[in-house]
């Protein structure tokens, strides 16, 4: 089972996750949703957040007690069913360049109140071959 809530299958149209997140946080602040509804991060997700989460520049929209961190999970063929959680940017890069197609999910987590929300989802880049040149200039 995946520790991430809200993960859906590939092919779903891209969603403005941030708007959903802000709406959720607002709903809690105004009492339309209870904090327990959104602050229930899976223990595994919390552990990952504490150990390998990358701090964002934003304070938690729910409790305002801590800066949130980002944790990225990668799902794909030949990876654990619950996804794998790269501990370093280099590891993440390697996962995104696997032969098999992968999907990465970045989740924002507050380790203070356990608020968590899916921030973005993106596909892997595929294996990099010497023939494939990067056309993107470093701007
Ligand atoms: Zn919080």
Image: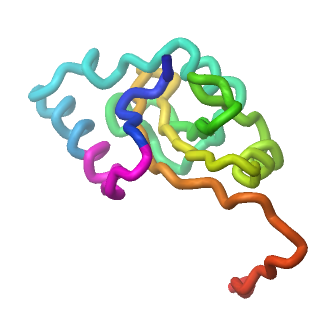
Residue at 71% x, 25% y: name it. Answer: 51
Q: Nearer the viewer, residue 11 or 111?
A: 11
Residue 105: x and y in percent read 52, 42
**36 versus 132 height, above or below:** above
Percent x, y of residue 5: 39, 27
Q: Does the magenta stretch include residue 114?
A: no
Outermost residue to the left: 32
112 lies above or below 58: above
Residue range highlighted in magenta = 10-22
Which one is nearer the viewer's eye here, 85 or 8?
A: 8
Query: Quadrant of the rendered structure where residue 47 is?
Result: top right
Q: How is the image coloured?
A: rainbow
Image label count: 0
Residue at image position (52%, 38%) is 67
- In the image, 40: left or right of 121? left
Q: Which residue is drawn at 9% across and 28% down?
A: 32
Image quarter for residue 21?
Answer: top left
Residue 103 percent coordinates (x, y): 56, 46
The quadrant of the image that shows the C terminus is: bottom right
Residue 89 in the image: above or below residue 4? below
- Which residue extends farthest top? 43
Does 13 appear in magenta? yes
Q: Is residue 119 left or right of residue 74?
A: left
Q: Which of 79 and 54 is in front in this view?
A: 79
Residue 8: x percent and y percent? 38, 37
* Figure quadrant of residue 78: top right
Question: Which residue lies at the image location 75% right of the left edge and 49% below the top edge?
Answer: 98
């Amino acid at each position: 089972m995946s520790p991430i809530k809200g993960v859906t299958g590939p092919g779903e149209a891209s969603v403005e996750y941030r708007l959903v997140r802000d709406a959720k946080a607002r709903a809690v602040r105004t009492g339309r949703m209870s904090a327990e509804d959104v602050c229930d991060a899976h223990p595994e997700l919390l552990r990952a957040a504490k150990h390998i989460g990358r701090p964002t520049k934003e304070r938690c929209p729910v409790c305002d007690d801590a800066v949130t961190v980002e944790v990225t999970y990668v799902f794909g063929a030949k990876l654990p069913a619950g996804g794998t959680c790269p501990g370093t940017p280099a590891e993440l890069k390697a996962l995104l360049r696997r032969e098999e197609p992968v999907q990465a999910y970045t989740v924002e987590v507050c380790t203070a109140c356990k608020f968590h929300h899916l921030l973005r989802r993106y596909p892997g880049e595929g294996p990099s071959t010497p023939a494939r040149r990067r056309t993107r200039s470093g701007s």
